[in-house]
Image: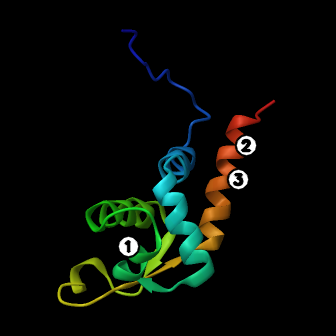
Amino acid sequence: MPRITQPHDDEWSADVEAAVATFGNRSRNEILRYLSAHGPATRGDIVAAVSAGEPSVAKHLLVLEESGAIVVDLEPGRRHGRSPRYSANSARIKELLAAHLQYLLKD
């Protein structure tokens, strides 16, 4: 089986990497669409609305938060015993999409 390699490319920025991680997964896209239309929402609200289970949604929310595509009303160390509310960060989503588009369509 051929090995997939990742050649060095100066144009592959941290934002392009974050865009691929953010938008390269259908569940993450569903979560972002839901939050854009209905947010802020708790994790339970998101689980009920998208086609993914609670453990999967929890992992996706971490990736989305790390990329800045969503924002949370509670800081990571203060969430124990509380239900944080997640919101889509449309400005960051647009930045990530623009970075990915620029990378793909580079002349």
Q: Is residue 9 left or right of residue 79?
A: right
- Secondary structure of the residue carrying tag 2 is helix
Q: Which residue ends up furthest to the top in the rendered image?
A: 1
Q: Is residue 3 left or right of residue 77?
A: right
- Amino acid type, residue under disc 3 in the picture: Ala
Q: Depth check: give the residue in front, 85 or 7.
A: 85
Where is residue 93, by image quadrant?
Answer: bottom right
Q: Identify the residue at horizontal 38%, vertical 60% (top origin).
A: 60
Query: What residue would you read off at disc 2?
Result: 102
Query: What residue would you read off at disc 1?
Result: 47
Are discs 2 and 3 less than 8 Å apart at CB? yes
- Amino acid type, residue under disc 1 in the picture: Val
Where residue 88 sits: x, y (%)?
A: 55, 75
Q: Would you place residue 102 above or below residue 77 in this image?
A: above
Query: What residue would you read off at disc 3?
Result: 98
- Secondary structure of the residue carrying tag 1 is helix
- Quadrant in which the C terminus is drawn: top right
Question: Is residue 69 at least partly visible in the picture?
Answer: no
Question: Is residue 42 at least partly visible in the picture?
Answer: yes
Q: CA distance from mark 2 to mark 3?
A: 6 Å
Where residue 28 sits: x, y (%)?
A: 48, 59
Q: Is residue 80 left or right of residue 51?
A: left
Q: CA distance from mark 3 to mark 1?
A: 28 Å
Q: Depth check: give the residue in front, 54 or 100.
A: 54
Where residue 86 sits: x, y (%)?
A: 44, 80
Q: Identify the residue at horizontal 29%, vertical 68% (top origin).
A: 54
- Amino acid type, residue under disc 2 in the picture: Gln
